[in-house]
Amino acid sequence: MKTRVVAAMSGGVDSAVAAGLLAEAGYEVVGVTMQMYAPTKPSYAKSCCGADDFDDARRSAAILGIPHYVLHFEETFERNVVARFADDYLSGRTPNPCVACNNFVKLGTLRDYADRLGAQYVATGHYARIEHEPKGVRLFRGTRAKDQAYALAQLSPAQLSRLLLPLGTLTKEETRAHASRLGLPVHDKPESQDICFVEGGDYRDVLVQRGYGTGAPGEMRDGRGAVVGAHEGIAGYTVGQRAGIGGAEAPQYVTRIDAATNTIVIGREDELLSPGLLAGHVNLIRPERFAGETDVLAMIRYRATPVRARARVDGETLQVRFDEPQRAVTPGQLIALLDLSGEEVLAGATIAEALP
C-alpha cells in the first residue's frame, strides 16, 4: 500500500515539481491549493492565490495524474498570519509572516486536513532537507542559492516529522529542468517574490486597507532622550532603516522602537551594533545540544550570513551573544541557530530585544 502525502501546490514551479517527484518515487500524492486571501493584482505580479495560479496548479496535477483540490483557508490565514503581522508592527516589532504561515497554515491547518485524508505526510516546495531518523528528525539547509531552511526553523520536531521536502538537494535550474521533463506548464513561470499578500510592495498599505492602521503619531528621540522629530505611527518603521532626519551631521537610523511610549529612537549607524539578543518562542529541534552554553552559527534574518555565537536556553528564553557585534538586531524577526558546519538547523526563536 502506497504512503499517502498531501502536496501543497501554489501554482508555481517548485510545488508542482515537488508533487511530481513524490509521485515518481511511489507516493500516493494528493495535490492541494490553499486559498488564503483574495488578491487584487494580476497573478503573475507575485501573488500565489490568483485564478491563474489555481489553474496552473490544476493543470499540473492533471498532467501528473494526481487528484487536486482547492481548500479555503482565508479565515485561518487572516487570524494566524495577517492579524499577527499587523499586531507585530503595531507593537514595534518587525514580523516574518512566512514563518507564521509555515507554522500555523501549512504545518497546522493543512496537516489537520492531511489527517482527515489519512495522509502520513505534508509536502512543500521549500529548498531545505529533512532527515527522518530513528532517534528523531533533523533539518538541514538546502542548496545555498535557494536555501529556505531558515523559514522552517520554528517548526517543532513533531511538525518536521510530518514534512517531506523533495527539492532539498536541487538548484532552481534543476527544478525547472524537472518541470520541463515532466511536461509541466509552469516550467518557465516567473518566481513569486516578497510577502504574498503585500501586493503593492508596501506593507503599510495592507495595514491601512484592512483597518489596522499604522498607529498614532509620536516623537522621535535620540539616544540621550532629546526630541529630534516626529513620526506618523510606529508601524511604519523597522530597526535599521534610515530615519531621514534633516540637519544631522551623520546619517541617522532607527535603533529602537518603544511601543510603550510610542517613541522611535534614532542614532548613528554604529549605534545599531549589538553584542547579542534575547529571544522567546524558543523551538529546539535538537534539544540535546542545549544542555549548557552552546557554540553555534546564528542567522538573525533571512539570507543573513551565519555568524559565530554562543547560545544558552534559560527556561523559555534564549540568550545569544555574538563573537562580533551585529547590525540591526530586530525584535520580531526569527533567529535560526545552526551547528558550526553551517548545515544543520538546531533551533529557532523570535527575537525579543537586542542586548545593549
Image: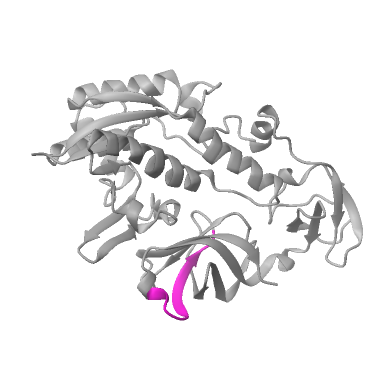
Tally of numbered discs = 0
Whether residue 176 is visible to the viewer of this picture, yes or no, is: no
Q: How is the image coloured?
A: one colour
Left or right, residue 122 beside residue 195 = left
Q: Is residue 177 above or below residue 68?
A: below
Residue drawn at x 38%, y 44% as measured from the top left: 107
Left or right, residue 8 beside residue 297 = left
Residue drawn at x 37%, y 55% as measured from the top left: 144
For the C terminus, the quadrant is bottom right
- Residue 259: image x %, image y %? 76, 53
- Residue 212: image x %, image y %? 70, 34
Segment tinted magenta in the rendering? 289-300
| Quarter assignment of residue 78 | top right
Q: Is residue 299 magenta?
A: yes
Q: Is residue 272 magenta?
A: no
Q: Is residue 306 above or below residue 188?
A: below
- Residue 270: image x %, image y %? 72, 68
Whether residue 86 is visible to the viewer of this picture, yes or no, is: yes
Residue drawn at x 33%, y 59% as measured from the top left: 139
- Residue 193: image x %, image y %? 49, 37
Q: Residue furthest bottom?
A: 292
Q: Is residue 136 above or below residue 163?
A: below
Residue drawn at x 42%, y 35% as measured from the top left: 191
Q: Residue furthest front?
A: 116
| Quarter assignment of residue 215 | top right
| Quarter assignment of residue 279 | bottom right
For the N terminus, the quadrant is top left
